[in-house]
Image (tube, rainbow, N blue to C red):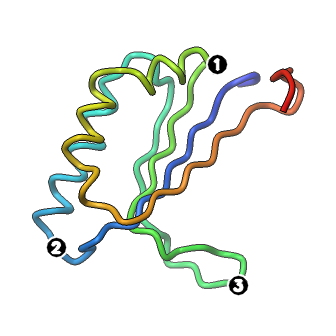
Amino acid sequence: MRNIFVHHVFFWLNEPGNLQVREKFEKGLQDLLQIGEIQEFHIGKPADTHRSVVENSYTYSLLVIFRDKEDHDIYQNHPIHHKFIDECGSFWNRIQVFDSVDPAKKQGTM
């Protein structure tokens, strides 16, 4: 698969030990997957790997793959995405996003 748009989001929950919050948050992540522009996805938790180069302090990660930036932009403005932010945004105290594209794809001026 080439010329895709990868959107990887890491979440640090306020109460990572609160099972009710985790269930609601996981349901919110699952609901996002209804957005038709998503080609592939992965919902994850930190793996049990411990090396100096591994960042594993986050609570959850969401990896979504789109055909292109245009599909990503549709996702960002989708009502389901806004609902997720409205309903789950209070659950996290930090969020980090990494977006990437194929190096061969022209993205315009940075």
Query: Residue 75 lies in what quarter of the image?
Result: top left
Residue 100: % across, % down: 70, 38
> Reading the chain from its start, which is encountered first: label 3 or label 2?
2
- For mark 1, what is the residue? 68
Q: Are marks 3 and 2 in contact (CB under 8 Å)?
A: no
Q: Looking at numbered disc 3 in the image, what kind of residue is underneath it?
A: Ser
Residue wearing tag 3: 52
Decide which of 46, 14 is in the foreground and name it. Answer: 14
> Can you tell which mark lies on residue 100?
none
Give the residue type at disc 1. Answer: Asp
Q: Circle 3: is it few (<14), some (14-19), or many (20+) Cα within 10 Å? A: few
Is 99 drawn above or below residue 68 in the view shown?
Answer: below
Disc 2 target residue = 18
Quadrant housing the N terminus: top right
The image quarter containing residue 4 is top right
- Residue 59 location in percent, x, y? 39, 67
**For the point 57% across and 79% down, which residue is it?**
49
Tell me the kind of residue under disc 2. Answer: Asn
Q: For mark 1, does the 10 Å Cα neighbourhood hold few (<14), some (14 to 19), or many (20 or more) residues?
A: some
Find out whether the residues at labels 3 and 1 contact each other: C-beta distance under 8 Å. Answer: no
Q: Residue 33: where, in percent of width, then height?
A: 34, 31
Residue shown at 46% from the left, 37% from the top:
41
